[in-house]
Image (spheres, rainbow, N blue to C red):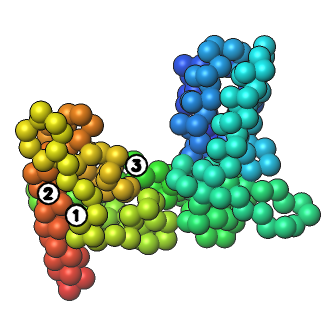
Amino acid sequence: MRADVKLVITAKDVEQFNLVPGARLSAGIGWRSLIHRALLGLKGLPIRAIIERDGGLSIEAEGLSDRDRMHLLDVRMHSRYVCELCGFEGKQIDDGQVDSSPRARCSAHRDWRTSPPFPAGQPTDPMEARLAISLYEREFLRREALWSLGGCNSRELALRLKQLDLIERLDAQYPLGVAAASTVHEVASNVPHIEFRNEPGLRVRVCDIPEPWRTRMELASTGSTMSLNAFYLHDWQKFLALWEREHQELLRLQATLSEE
Ligand SMILES: [Zn+2]
């Protein structure tokens, strides 16, 4: 049986919180971190529903104080500007139809729905749908594929190149992150180099690296030292140089394969 496209949170996404049996869950997974923030603020109150309503995140719980209500309202207002699918910056989309309601979406997922029926153009393949909305999953697969290009047999190589083709298509169709279209050189020149007082060496702050490059760097640099929420400049530059080399190699392999 074919797996379903899963674009809304499940009980597993919020298993550490106090959900009442049969709690209603119908909010997009792009809001997962907002939902966690909302529920942490409720400090264990029983949760009856986590749903999307009129373009915003709506949480129903038992025993709410006025302060809790204000907290939920604050998260709800914020959710209106976070894409319900990918979690990046979004806005309220309203088609103005009598039977439609507003939704929080980024431009890449403007017409997407969180549940069937899916509109034409929205992937119905579960893996493709996840890769189209999850930056982490897309970059994880890219990193895995890039790392294995050098040492695999021709069958594996064809599979990896196919995965990288899919990722490139998704990058173009559903760009994730403000710097998705930036080149290595643009990113390199836009991220400031800083020096911490009493700490040797130049660094780049993690928060200064725009997405998707931050996630790419984090996935590629599991072995490098990070302290004070910053990478050493030489590790950052090493990563950017590696990225260039890998993509030149990828172009070469794609060209070789298309000639065969
Ligand atoms: Zn989005």
Asked whether residue 222 appears in the rendered view, the answer is no
The answer to which of 217 and 153 lies nearer the viewer is: 217
Which residue appears at 56% of the width and 30% of the height?
36
Q: Is residue 191 above or below residue 41?
A: below
Q: Is residue 46 above or below residue 193?
A: above
Whole-number angstrom distance, CA of label 2 to CA of label 1: 8 Å
Local SS, label 2: helix
Q: Is residue 48 left or right of residue 18?
A: right
Q: Earlier in the sequence, mark 3 or mark 1?
A: 3
Which residue appears at 70% of the width and 40% of the height?
76
Ligand 1 under 8 Å from disc 1 Cβ = no
Local SS, label 3: helix
Q: Which residue is mark 3?
A: 137
Amino acid of disc 1:
Ala
**Could you tell me residue 35's position as x and y percent?**
61, 33
Which residue appears at 38% of the width and 70% of the height?
181
- Single out the mark in the foreground, 3 or 1: 1
Q: Which residue is mark 1?
A: 188
Amino acid of disc 3:
Glu
**Could you tell me residue 3's position as x and y percent?**
56, 46
Q: Earlier in the sequence, mark 2 or mark 3?
A: 3
Q: The C terminus appears in which quarter of the rendering?
A: bottom left
Q: Is residue 148 left or right of residue 20?
A: left
Whole-number angstrom distance, CA of label 3 to CA of label 1: 24 Å
**Could you tell me residue 165's position as x and y percent?**
34, 69
Ligand 1 under 8 Å from disc 2 Cβ = no
